[in-house]
Amino acid sequence: MFFKKKKEQTIEKIDPNNLPLHIGVIMDGNGRWAAKRHLPRSAGHRAGADTFEKIVKYCDKIGIKAITAYAFSTENWNRPKAEVDNLMNLLYNYLLMAEEKFAGTNVILRVIGDRSALSDKINEAIDHAIGVTDGNTGIVLNMALNYGGRDEIVRATRIAAENVKNGMISPDEIDGEYLDKLMYTADNPPVDLIIRPSGEKRLSNFLLWQAAYAEFWYSDINWPDFSEKDMERAIIDYQKRNRRFGKV
Ligand code: IPE
Ligand code: IPE
Ligand code: MG
């Protein structure tokens, strides 16, 4: 009889010298989280908002430079009005409480997406919250609101076309680098890692341009259950990837 030698447990840690500079998160699975608990979808969205706060704080703490959180897509308007209203109310209350929400953090809030379709009330709350984090120097938090990757590319193309029309540039000056500067994320470091919980394996119109060479990490966990530990796992996994960028 023999005893199998117990496998030595290696407790993996994040390598602080190889952090993804910019993480994109598709905060999905709120509805399924609620359904599992026989709760209304709104309870899932509320729980998802708590997770969002927790994860942003964690990313700030470990030194991530930027995080883009997909909160409302250009397609999410197609949901029942009651759910859209609920999401907008949740967002409004969160933004109004910005002093409290961002207290003790070094988060710099930004909003990406087409703000023109958001109500005046929401837009005022966004400006208020952005003002609260003004002067902070830590992680940039891009909240993607009424955001769509295709919309973002169309918007950039229109600006480039206007610039050609006005004689500011010639058509051959439009290249990847030029368009990069016309994306909402122009000032941010490149998106290194995109995380999608809830079991779906699609981008759903998130960061289409920026995803060109991002690493993907999927998980079956619904967003409200996503923990700091899961974020740690995703980053450790990212750090094991061999990023080749087309080279050998
Ligand atoms: C993500 O959760 C929240 C938003 C899209 C605003 P969902 O509401 O999509 O949750 P599921 O996918 O139905 O579980
Ligand atoms: C993506 O989730 C949008 C956000 C998380 C804000 P969806 O739930 O809208 O995506 P699909 O419909 O499953 O592709
Ligand atoms: Mg969903």
Image (tube, helix red, strand yellow):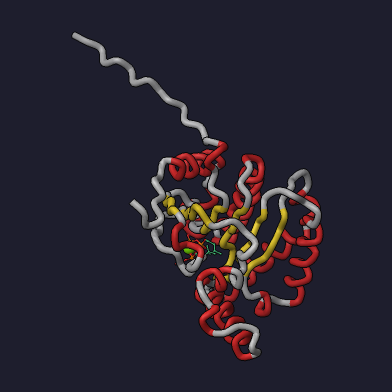
Tell me the quadrant of the picture where the N terminus can be found: top left
At 54% from the left edge and 69% from the top edge, which residue is drawn? 177
Q: Position of residue 53 (x, y in %)?
A: 65, 50
Work out which residue is located at the far top of the displayed protein and give it.
1
- Horizontal side, residue 176 vs residue 169: left or right: left
At 74% from the left edge and 47% from the top edge, which residue is drawn? 106
- Horizontal side, residue 222 vs residue 6: left or right: right
- Horizontal side, residue 62 vs residue 18: left or right: right
Q: Position of residue 29 (x, y in %)?
A: 49, 57
Work out which residue is located at the far bottom of the displayed protein and give it.
165
- Considering only vertical position in the picture, is 205 above or below 242? below
Asked whether residue 35 is in view, the answer is: no
Asked whether residue 243 is in view, the answer is: yes
Q: Position of residue 14 (x, y in %)?
A: 52, 36
- Considering only vertical position in the picture, is 214 above or below 231? below
The number of numbered discs placed on residues in the rendered structure image is 0
At 71% from the left edge and 51% from the top edge, which residue is drawn? 107
Q: Position of residue 214 (x, y in %)?
A: 46, 56
> Who is closer to the viewer here, 98 or 37?
98
At 67% from the left edge and 50% from the top edge, which residue is drawn? 139
Q: Quadrant of residue 62?
A: top right
- Considering only vertical position in the picture, is 20 above or below 81? above
